[in-house]
Amino acid sequence: MLETIWFLLWGILWAVYFMLDGFDLGLGTLNPFISRNETEKRILYNSMGPFWDGNEVWLIAAGGVTFAAFPTMYAVMFSALYSPLLLILFGLIIRGVAFEFRGKIDNEGWRVLWDICHFLGSFGPALLFGVAFANIFQGIPIDGRGVFQGSILTLLNPYGILGGLLFVMLFLVHGALWLAIKSSGDLEARAGRTAGRLWWALLVVAVVFLVATFFSTNLYANYFANPVLFVVPLVTVSALLAVRWFIAIKRWWKAWFASSLTIVTATLFGIIGLYPNMLPSSLNPKYSLTAFNSASSPLTLKIMLVVALVFVPIVILYQAWGYYLLRGKVTEEDLASDEAY
Amino acid sequence: MDVVFLSRLQFAVATLFHFFFVPLTIGLVIMIAIMETIYARRGDEEYRRMAKFWGKIFLINFAVGVVTGITLEFQFGTNWAGYSKYVGDIFGSLLAIEATATFFLESVFIGLWAFSWDKVSPKLHALFIWLVAAASTGSAYWILVANSWMQHPVGYVIRGGRAELVDFWAVITQPFAIVTFAHVVSAAYILAAFFVMGVCSYHILRKTHVAFATKSFRIAVTFALIFSLGNILIGDLHGKEMAKAQPTKLAAAEAQWETMKGAPFVLLRIPDEENERNPIDLIAIPKFLSWLALGSADAEFKGLKEWPKEERPPVALTFWSFRIMVGLGFLFALVSLIAFWKRNKLESAPWLLKGLMWMIPLPYLAASMGWLVTEVGRQPWIVYGVMKTSEAASEVAASQVGFSLAAFVVVYTLLGIACFTLIAKFVAQGPKAPPAEAK
């Protein structure tokens, strides 16, 4: 029971991370293609300015919880995914400092350098998180001692790449919507149009992914065993459709919330399908890591549950309050402030 | 080179680099919070400018600290899978608590603080930076509790081939952890105080922003004095805990080969690791080492030869790191005393200002040496007395680790240069002119 609760919490933490940092990563990927001048670029950076750091902590929390609640899973997952994970981390490093460094020296070459870093550090992690999770869904070659018997090329299989593409598309739409919320005038209109167009591409990738999931993974088994669970992907699909509707009527906040719901439930769709596996072995199902054979002791799980139940709601409260406090569009006055990016 | 060695090197590079940024964050934020509180209470614009000036440097430094911290958390999984499986039950939960209870608070409010100067009342804004300050200190606590458990494991039992938690309270309140926390945080205050004093000295020497720099200097010198004196006492307590918990580390830190009753403290010592002796051993203070470490002048101090070679840490590295750290610690106390004494007539003491300017790197050096003593001195154990470092690494290809190590070195070097350039730029530029003068 404790293991199952933790399995769910583990999934939720990843889902919230993808929902929050998703728009940062998507917007970073979109940046070179959507912004037409320096002012627009700055609006884009500052739209994420107060939030990206807090968003990224969800990744640290997800990682920490994996370590605390499922140490064996943590050890095997991250050593198996050694290269992609380090690429993600290096990406997030250059992305994070790009925010802070870019505007600090008034030189075109300096800005271009950090624009490139910001793009690579957004696109790379978006893609690789998708590749990593698609591979987890379909299983990776780990042996009985939890040692990875493949290379980075093993992970770059068609289904893995499809997963990467899905994440990138989800985040692009999500990011474009965030920009529409935070900008005004021409840029807002362009961001909204971009979100609308990208949505169709997302739809195609999502449908292909869902079909491929049927053939490449066992995710649907849990759903056929408990059809009531189909509620989750149903919410995903409805939310995705709602995104398009809200884009059409130019309700950016609503579209963004629908997009958030899409990302959260899409992640949960995969996680629920995975249960009780956390890291299925493609060599032999007996080698798979599950919520049960990789969990911490009951005492640790209990203490951590108390910690999570106390602190996570508090975090959500103050983080949401922060979003509410700085909910306005990025104005010229904002751009003129000393601390603006 | 083997995976264990490469992984150790990579972790050392990543940790030492990360810890160039952490202490300034922990220390500077408190001073900024004090400055902003003075502004919020008195409405004195000078203190707002002060908080903004130091805040800008703080934010640049903070960004690098954050992004380099993430790689540390994940490296336990990528490079130390054996360790993670074995102790995740305890160690992992401490890292997870750090993230949920403190790091969230720090990161969310740093964003709010930086972007809401003109959007909320000065008092609320000052509260934001106090939350950041409290959270960064809290983060330090949890991380150091986790590290202390590797130095002195308590509250666990070995069950089913791994260490499992049995007494959480013992883990988070053990004296070793508390004294380590006090030692590190107070070192962070010293580092930040010397940073601020050095920067201020630069401006006072050049006669730019003199009034501004003098006010900042006074806040910093108070910190420097309290914590550099305090850390001598705390360091002594830390050493006594180490004597109880990690006798091999202490023996290596002192390069004491033979077990002795009433061991002397030798001021000038150069160890020869290969031949297990100290060819240069000058100016001994009789019985002082036994008294310092063990609390009694006649106590038996266990020498390195008590343990087989394979259970001893590298002696020379531990010894020199310890000596340099301790020496610098006393230097900081001395300089703080002089600076405090001269704080009202700084302009008449250019030698002091020059000295302080050039001293900025020294607390960084001392902090790095401190970590080398802590981590190298713990060897060959990853968890002292419980798990050897050689059993802890992931089974990944050495080439993979070699490649990532090279990437760390390259990326971090470039990052360090960029960060240094920016901080130097804003330091040299000084605070913005107050609105009245700007017109």
Image: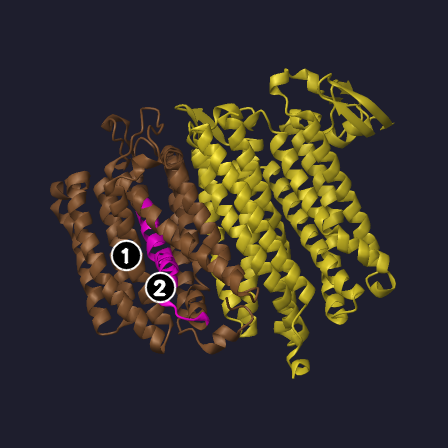
Q: CA distance from mark 1 to mark 2?
A: 17 Å
| Nearer to us: label 1 or label 2 | 2
**Which segment is the magenta one?**
A9-38
Instruction: Left or right? Give the position of B328 relative to B57.
Output: right
Crowdedness near tag 2: few (<14), some (14–19) or many (≥20) residues, C-alpha within 10 Å: few
Which residue does the numbered mark 1 point to in the structure image?
Answer: A170
Q: What percent of the width, then of the height, locates residue B154?
A: 53, 31
Name the kind of residue labelled 1 in the image.
Leu
Which image quarter: residue A4? Answer: top left
The structure residue drawn at horizontal position 20% and vertical position 48%, both measured from the top left corner, is: A209
Inspect the magenta stretch and tell me whether residue A11 lies in it.
yes
Which image quarter: residue A242? Answer: bottom left
Instruction: Left or right? Give the position of A121 relative to A163.
Output: right
Q: Which residue is nearer to you in this view: A29 or A74?
A: A29
Question: Looking at the magenta stretch, what is its main secondary structure?
Answer: helix
The structure residue drawn at horizontal position 20% and vertical position 53%, both measured from the top left corner, is: A206
Name the colour assigned to chain A in the rendering. brown
Q: What percent of the width, then of the height, locates residue A295?
A: 35, 34
Chain where mark 1 sits: A
The structure residue drawn at horizontal position 17% and vertical position 60%, both measured from the top left corner, is: A238
Q: Say yes or no: labels 1 and 2 on the same chain.
A: yes
The structure residue drawn at horizontal position 63% and vertical position 66%, both measured from the top left corner, is: B53
Q: Which quarter of the figure is the N terminus of chain A placed in?
A: top left
Secondary structure of the residue carrying tag 2 is helix
Which tag, 1 or 2, sits closer to the chain's start?
A: 2
Name the colour assigned to chain B in the rendering. yellow
Crowdedness near tag 1: few (<14), some (14–19) or many (≥20) residues, C-alpha within 10 Å: many
Which residue does the numbered mark 2 point to in the structure image?
Answer: A33
